[in-house]
Image: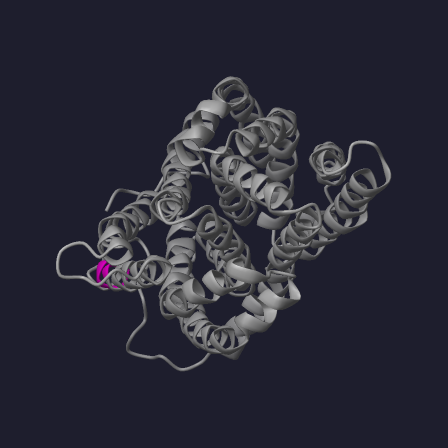
Amino acid sequence: MSKSVNLISGPIDSSLRKFALPLALSFLIQNLYTWVDMYYVSRLSPTAIAALKVCEQLIFFLFSIASGFAIGSGVVVARRIGEGEKSKANHTATQSLLLMLFISVILATVFYFFSPLILTLMNIKGEVLILSIQYLSMIVFGIPANFLIFHINAIVRASGNSVFPMTILITANVLNAIIAPFLIFGLGPFPRMEIYGAGLAAAIAQNLGFLIALIFILKKFAPIELELKSLKIDSIIFKKIFKIGVPATLQLIAVSVNRIILTSIANMFGVTVLTTYMFGLGVDLFVFMSIFAVGAAIEIITGQNLGANKIDRIFKYHLSSIKQLSVLLVLLIILVFLAGEYFTSIFISDPVLIKEIVIYLRIAVFSYIPFAVGIVSLRVISGSGDYNRSLRIVLFIFFGVQLPVCYLLSNYTSLSYQGIWYGILVSQLVFAFVSLRILYKKKWITTKV
């Protein structure tokens, strides 16, 4: 299923585009899953939209715990690929998949029993709380499959093949888009399950997607092979994955906790502000798909080129990513600034809420390019395996800068709740500066994986 891109000796600009484009489409498709569900759920009630967006934050938190190990596995696999050790890369992939299976089942089980308590601690109340619990009670059955899909895609991507992950995500999301309306609205012989149906449809699609991905791997349609003849646990590989996976997981948890706290701060000002933040964040994430894709590409590129001892190419890729992302983001900034109101009106009819979302978006767009610079710089550092250093950056930005600034501006200035939006902008500017500064200190280059 498509050949891997030569990231070690191919031309810089075109290799980056060829590798990152399928990743961007993958992340875009994954984000479209959210918008498709929101479109269907928006036909139920505005409260259902708020519940769905709250659940997304909680699921992202859970996903963060497991996905760090997938990212860690990808970094190790990329380094082995760069060193020309294909058999060791296959061995790492097999061991990491066993680890993810174990972790995902445990997390899903714990999540099933404790999600109502977590929602209550998030200060979610009333009908939003009831609908959130209903949605989570169904989607939890797809969580292990979702984690395993992400893990398979991460290790295949580490080999330089980004088309395989895109294909799997397209399949899973198309299945969800087809199944969801039947279960939500009770079309044909199916009962009307409303938000229960949205969660169940996602769970079914995720399980089918995992089965398809596994079949493709076993049929050797991907450049990574699983060692099914000897499935003994390799403690050495586990230690390597944990060494990178734990700080990677903590980094993703930090992002998730940050979002949860920001959600709580927004919720202090009422449902309108909460929905504004949830919807606006959804638009931001839609734009950020290209940034995340290039960041993921840079992480793999760094691992492979470090393995091949081609340090100069890493910095050339870094510069190329910033230039190419800046061109794209300028176009997206103009689009969001000018067409944000029209896009919002597709999902929301309340004129007051539309106005508030437009204000949010017209502030948020100025953070897009600084965020891109910060992400690609951070991903070079983490791609070397130095996730401890990148974790410290994330903790400083989110908990030392963003949360305090957002809280102070929104509670102790005349900006009121809009202080949250300006606080996010300030933190992204600091993020770009700090990440670049640490990147060019070059201490991450000596990291052993």
Residue 402 placement (x, y as % from top left): 75, 43
Q: Is residue 89 above or below residue 312?
A: below
Query: Residue 194 appears in which quarter of the rendering?
Result: bottom left
Quarter of the picture holding the C terminus? bottom right
Q: Residue furthest bottom?
A: 232
Q: Can residue 310 be seen by looking at this rendering?
A: no
Q: Can residue 4 be seen by looking at this rendering?
A: yes
Magenta stretch mostly in which secondary structure? helix
Looking at this view, is 224 or 85 the one in front?
A: 224
Side of 240 relative to 108 (left or right): right
Looking at this view, is 402 or 440 the one in front?
A: 402
Residue 405 placement (x, y as % from top left): 80, 41
Side of 404 relative to 285 (left or right): right
Side of 67 relative to 244 (left or right): left
Does the magenta portion include 139? no
Query: Residue 17 appears in which quarter of the rendering?
Result: top left
Q: Is residue 60 above or below residue 433?
A: below
Side of 401 relative to 124 (left or right): right
Looking at this view, is 97 or 84 the one in front?
A: 97
Does the magenta portion include 213? yes
Identify the residue shown where x is 62% and y is 59%: 253
Residue 116 placement (x, y as % from top left): 54, 71
Q: Which residues are magenta?
A: 212-216
Residue 407 placement (x, y as % from top left): 79, 45
Q: Residue furthest left?
A: 189
Query: How did the renderer colour the structure?
Result: one colour
